[in-house]
Amino acid sequence: MSPNQLGFYTLLKKEVMRFWSVLGQTVTAPVLTALLYLLVFAQALQGRVVTGYDGVSYTQFLLPGLVMMTVLQNAFANTSSSLAQSKVNGNLVFLLMAPIGPIEMFLAYVGAALVRALLVALAMLAVAGPLVGLPIANPVALLAMFLLAGSALAVLGMIAGIVSTKFDHLAAFSNFIITPLSFLSGVFYSVHSLPPIWFTASHLNPFFYMIDGFRYGFFGHADVSIWLSLGWTAGFFVLMATICLWMLVTGYKLRK
Amino acid sequence: MNTSSPAALSIDGVRKAYGAVQALNGLRLDIRQGEFFGLLGPNGAGKSTLISIISGLIRADEGTVSVLGHDTVRDWRAARRQLGVVPQELVFDPFFKVVDLLRIQAGYYGCGREVWPWIDEMLERLELGNKRTAMMRSLSGGMKRRVLIAQALVHRPPVVILDEPTAGVDVELRRTLWRFMRDLHSRGTTVVLTTHYLEEAQEMCERIAIVDKGQLRIVETTEGLLNRHPFRFLTLKLADDARLPSQLAELVTSEKAGSIELKLDRERHPIASVFAGLKAAGVEIADVSTREPDLEDIFVELTTKSASGVAS
């Protein structure tokens, strides 16, 4: 392994160790929260909501959306909290003084966020999947949507971590961007059940495509074409990655 | 010393401004390989800005910096591999054990298991052996400072910068640190020290630069710096509440517990002339002692001149 590769691998490992050392907070808690959503919404709405998917119960419809929503929130949380905490604590200097380049830093942070997101997704599917009886129609689409959407939110988390100079800023990103976009993305309902204006608005929300494309991987059909979902998610990832890499290369809010 | 080898640190025309405030104003300085070098200056002189530019945390508006011939912007990876910096602030990652933190830091520099024995040696030398598996957040301030020092040295850098490493630490840590640094220096490591404890700089450093208001005031060997001062100090205790004659009163620098310190120009005020003046005025002396100027006197002299120069 070259010194540069070892630098990348060490940062990736360190970021995984960071969330691993507080696993109860970073994996167990979000899984439990999502499963509570599943329990409550399934109990309250099973049989009352038309999913628009033939032969798919509301609980089956709900689970993939909840898994993807948890993936998105945890990918974002992993990178944003790590960077913001290191900035506020001041220990980010040890990374900034090291011979680790912008690309290595980018890949290591995103990689660790995907590991956390994967753990959360697998835990949810392992616990709730057998109970709900979830099919897997297209594993390639599932994997592609997981990687693209998880990476996009991990990168958005990096941007939030870089921009934030205090935890209030980070909370604002989470409360005013991530949570509303997650809840208005069709996790709990099919967008076809919405009034026209909200139906149109949903189609401008990148989170909608991430969840819809992920759902396609399980059921083989979704509200919109899988290609449209892949296109929107890939486009969002490229936009976020461009902004983030620009920040890392120029040292925006990192190097004065 | 091989004069053809590149400087350990070469700082050429570095400027940095924060709005209207010029933190560094065209600073030029070469620090030779193997030197124990003191970088001194009052608060706000630009020392920390300079160290941040050298380590890549701040980008200079103008000028270049190279570490052992590697430009810190164009050849940043190689430059950073040659450099270890102990930051001034007590910053740490609370999630890790001491030994894990040091191994992670080594990994950032592309160093693997081959440096683990060195990490173990540092833990012993810095008296952290019984804290190797302690969580960082559980350590006292002094212990955290030791870890910071070890973190800067994990990749065995040939050039080490210590930014006020002994600020607020106890005597034991100071002794441990200086013993360790002397040993590293004797094995060829270039050490650059900034400190407000000038007696430390006087004792440890071979050459000293004084920076003030973003400019280099002087760079000189420690001995040369001490010798170039044209003053010496004479402390008198006068008998029976006697008063100094007026021509000597203007030389008084301090008066404490009945002792009066006079600052004497070696040329203009030989000690014999002071005694002659006292005798002529009929003043009796109860006690007398002399003191050669130390680095603090020279520091005050240079930075005070600078301040008055700017004010005028």
Image (cartoon, coloured by chain):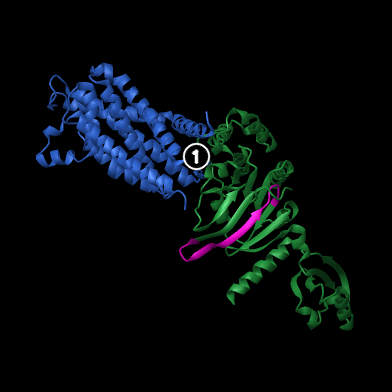
Chain colours: A blue, B green
Decide whether residue A55 is among the magenta residues.
Answer: no
Please report the residue visible at 45 percent of the width from the left and 33 percent of the height from the top.
Answer: A15
Name the residue tied to disc 1: A100
Magenta-drawn stretch, dominant element (helix, strand or loop):
strand
Q: Position of residue A6 (x, y in %)?
A: 52, 31
Q: Nearer the viewer, residue B160 or B5?
A: B5
Q: Which residues are magenta?
A: B17-36
Q: Residue at x 28, y 45 (%)?
A: A176
A151 to the left or right of A98:
left
Q: Nearer the viewer, residue B286 or B110?
A: B110
Q: Give above or below for B24 relative to B150.
A: below
Query: Which residue type does callout 1 highlight?
Result: Ile
Return the x and y of residue B94 as percentages of the image width and height. Answer: 51, 38
Residue A161 in view in this figure: yes
In front: B304, or B111? B111
Q: Position of residue A128 (x, y in %)?
A: 28, 20
Residue B14 is situated, as x and y percent measured from the top left of the image, at 55, 58
Element class at badge 1: loop
**How packed is label 1: few (under 14 Cα within 10 Å), some, or many (20 or more)?**
many
Image position of A31 (left or right of B90) = left
Please indicate, yes or no, whether residue A25 appears anywhere in the rendered image: no
For residue A185, which quarter of the picture? top left
Q: Residue furthest left?
A: A196
**Between A213 and A51, the one nearer to me in the picture:** A213
Q: Magenta stretch containing residue B20, yes or no?
A: yes
Total marks shown come to: 1
Q: Chain of mark 1?
A: A
Residue B207 falls in image quadrant: bottom right
